[in-house]
Amino acid sequence: MHLKNSPHTLEMLTKDNWNLPYSREKAAFPLRHTRENKFWPTVRRVDDAYGDRNLICTCTPMEDFMVE
């Protein structure tokens, strides 16, 4: 089953209101192994699909690690 609205945040899963066509359990643990290794995202998606396709690295440039 494809969960169209994933990932689900902990806040979404614990609210009283649940209007999605699948259970909270399926949303929280879509695969059997996720019960033991679950990562709870704090946000769903950054800037929807645009943010997924256009990632921005905010890491320190490699030049800063170079030793002269």
Image (tube, grey):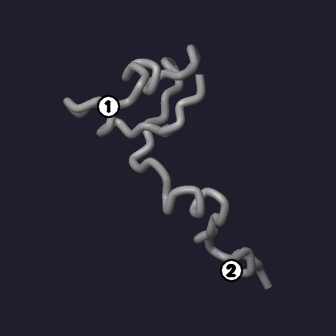
Residue sitting at x 39%, y 19% = 23
Mark 2 burial class by Cα count in 10 Å: few <14, some 14-19, many 20+: few
* Residue 46 left/right relative to 42: right
Work out how far the residue at label 1 is from the one at label 2, CA to CA, in angstroms. Answer: 48 Å
Point out residue 9 in the picture as x, y percentages from the top left corner.
Answer: 39, 40
- The secondary structure type at the circle numbered 1 is loop
Residue sitting at x 29%, y 30% = 18
Q: Most extreme residue toward the bottom, as rendered?
A: 68
Mark 2 highlights which residue?
64
Q: Most extreme residue toward the right, as rendered?
A: 68
In-front residue for pair 62/68 = 62
Q: Is residue 5 above or below residue 2?
A: below
Number of dots carrying numbers: 2
User: Is the C terminus in the top left, top right, bottom left or bottom right quadrant?
Assistant: bottom right
Location of residue 13 (image quadrant): top left
Q: Is residue 12 above or below residue 35?
A: below
Q: Is residue 60 above or below residue 28?
A: below
- The secondary structure type at the circle numbered 2 is helix
Mark 1 highlights which residue?
19
Residue sitting at x 41%, y 25% = 21
Point out residue 28 in the picture as x, y percentages from the top left corner.
Answer: 43, 26
Which label's residue is closer to the chain start, 1 or 2?
A: 1
Disc number placed over residue 7 in the picture, else none = none
Task: Identify residue type, mark 1.
Answer: Asn
In-front residue for pair 25/38 = 25
Mark 1 burial class by Cα count in 10 Å: few <14, some 14-19, many 20+: few
Residue sitting at x 53%, y 22% = 30
In-front residue for pair 19/61 = 19
In-front residue for pair 37/28 = 28
Task: Identify residue type, mark 2.
Answer: Asp
* Residue 36 left/right relative to 16: right
Point out residue 56 in the picture as x, y percentages from the top left corner.
Answer: 62, 69
